[in-house]
Image (cartoon, rainbow, N blue to C red):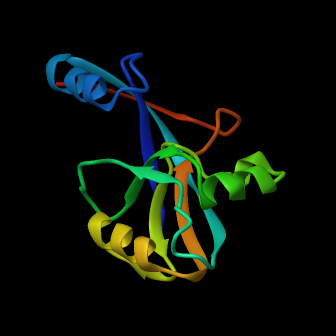
Amino acid sequence: MVTDFIVAVNGVHGDADAMLERCRTDTTVALVCRRGVDITIVFDRHDENVPLGLEFATQHVGESLLVTGICEGIAKDYNERTIDTARHLRPGDRILEVCGHAGASMALQSILAKAMGKLQLSVVRPSSNEFVQSHWRFEH
């Protein structure tokens, strides 16, 4: 699956509501887009009493689960053990599949909450600044 991210609108970045407002109100819209990077992350969960250590968006919209925070638990332990920081799970990542199951964000969160053993997550995030960015300009 190819996923693109709009990362800035008319110089506004990091605030989806503000970016959407610029799209609605500005007569000329300049977008900065980045291609998504797919990452596979595998957690080991052998104790249901150990928290996952993931926080998610409260609005469940779409076919991915938006990670909004990493806290004490399996995710934080995974990040601390993984030397390659590009493979860390981080806020802003979108979980597309949990253990091979894709679906609506609420379904993904439910699967993740109950899963035990090896948990394979398919994650997508915008490419870093080192990659080529696309710039688009629209007038309406």
Residue in the foreground of this view, choosing between 13 and 9:
13
Number of callouts: 0
Image point 30% across, 26% down: which residue?
19
Q: Is residue 16 left or right of residue 69?
A: left
Question: Can you give x and y, in whole percent of width and height, for residue 76 in the image?
Answer: 64, 51
Q: Is residue 117 above or below residue 112?
A: below
Write the residue at 20% across / 16% down. Answer: 26
Give whichever of 76, 126 is nearer the camera.
Answer: 76
Is 128 placed left or right of 92 in the picture?
A: right
Whether residue 110 is situated above or below residue 35 in the rendered picture: below
Asked which quadrant contains residue 126, the reply is: top right
**Against 6, is 102 above or below?**
below
Quarter occupied by the C terminus: top left
Q: Residue 114 location, x and y as percent?
A: 42, 78
For residue 80, side relative to residue 102 (left or right): right
Q: Residue at x 43, y 26 (%)?
A: 14
State the residue at coordinates (30%, 73%).
107
Front residue of 76/60: it is 76
The furthest residue to the right? 83
Counting from the top left corner in percent of width and height, residue 5 is at 44, 44
Q: Position of residue 117 (x, y in %)?
A: 61, 83
